[in-house]
Image (cartoon, grey):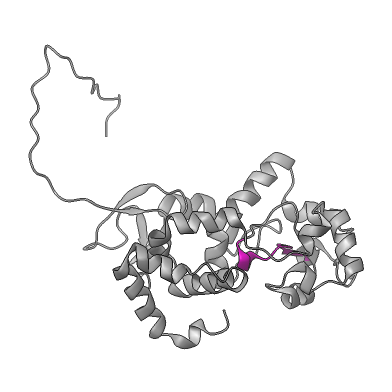
Amino acid sequence: MQDVALGLDLDEEESTIFTEVPGETVTLKKCSYCQRMLPVDSDRLGTLAFHKHNAKPTKHQNECRACKKWRINDSFNPLRTTDQLHESSLITRERRLFLRDPERLQQYKKREGAGLKSQIWERFGRQCFYCGKRLELTEVQLDHTRPLAYLWPIDEFATCLCAVHNNQKTDKFPVDFYNDHQLRELSQITGLPYTELTAKAVNQDELERIRLDIVTFAREWEPRTFAATARKVRELMPHVDLFEELKAADEYVHAELVDALAKRPLGVQGL
């Protein structure tokens, strides 16, 4: 421990000449959240920049320690406030992290001075939009409006629903869940155009993120998350096959993913 900062500037005249010599190999892993390349040690799992996670191909969690503590757990731990989302399934969680939902919620609160959940609750008259049931803030379920499963993040266009109707809507598009009168009213409340609420589309910006770095996502995501996402994309865009794109980019990673899915077929069905 130093009391003062060390002077590391090189003096061209007085400094000793340095020579490079072979050193130890450092293994780096990309944080799926902040995208930094940080060190890991396969012989001492969980000792450096990432926590240990035996279920992952790399044996480490997808997110680095800093992101896990300061950006993710603040929104996804059991002690979070009513203005934060409830933790859901693994696939939903990984999709939310990919779409940066925790960071979006924190930024919204800093910008508006109140959490998104509180704002949406007030905007919808403190009641479920679908059935009109009066809700306490702790009862509010924030619905993405445009489905998370199709890569739409949480935003200011969210809908206030009760637990029953949020569970019923799940991954449905608004046009498949609401009647025409409700769609027009939802457009007025949220500000989303009626044409968007009646359309079915994958978020192209987020899909492009996946396609540009598909090998990394295949490695870092739980196999079921990749499979479920690929299925949803192909459902609306039959010409886009993420499995084929992955195979073209890296046959080895593709084979690993397919093998992992084959070992747990029941977990892949219906996602």
Q: Is residue 176 visible in this depiction of the protein? A: yes
Residue found at x 8% / y 21%: 16
The foreground one among 270 and 235 is 235
The foreground one among 132 and 233 is 233
Q: Is residue 225 left or right of residue 205?
A: left
Spot occupied by residue 202 in the image (x, y as percentages of width and height): 62, 62
263, above or below 84, in the image: below
Q: Where is residue 130, by image quadrant?
A: bottom right
Spot occupied by residue 265 in the image (x, y as percentages of width and height): 45, 86
Rendered-image quadrant of the C terminus: bottom right
- Residue extending farthest to the bottom is 266
Spot occupied by residue 81 in the image (x, y as percentages of width and height): 67, 57
Rendered-image quadrant of the N terminus: top left
Q: Is residue 124 magenta?
A: no
- Residue extending farthest to the top is 13
The foreground one among 1 and 204 is 204
Residue found at x 65% / y 61%: 85
Q: How many marks?
A: 0
Q: Where is residue 12, by image quadrant?
A: top left
Q: Is residue 2 left or right of residue 126?
A: left
Q: Where is residue 219, by image quadrant?
A: bottom left
114, above or below 250, in the image: above
The foreground one among 85 and 165 is 165
Q: Which contiguous range is marked in magenta?
A: 140-151
Q: Is residue 260 left or right of residue 205?
A: left
Q: Is residue 143 magenta?
A: yes
Spot occupied by residue 68 in the image (x, y as percentages of width and height): 47, 55
Residue found at x 56% / y 56%: 206
- Residue extending farthest to the front is 239
Q: Is residue 121 visible in this depiction of the protein? A: no
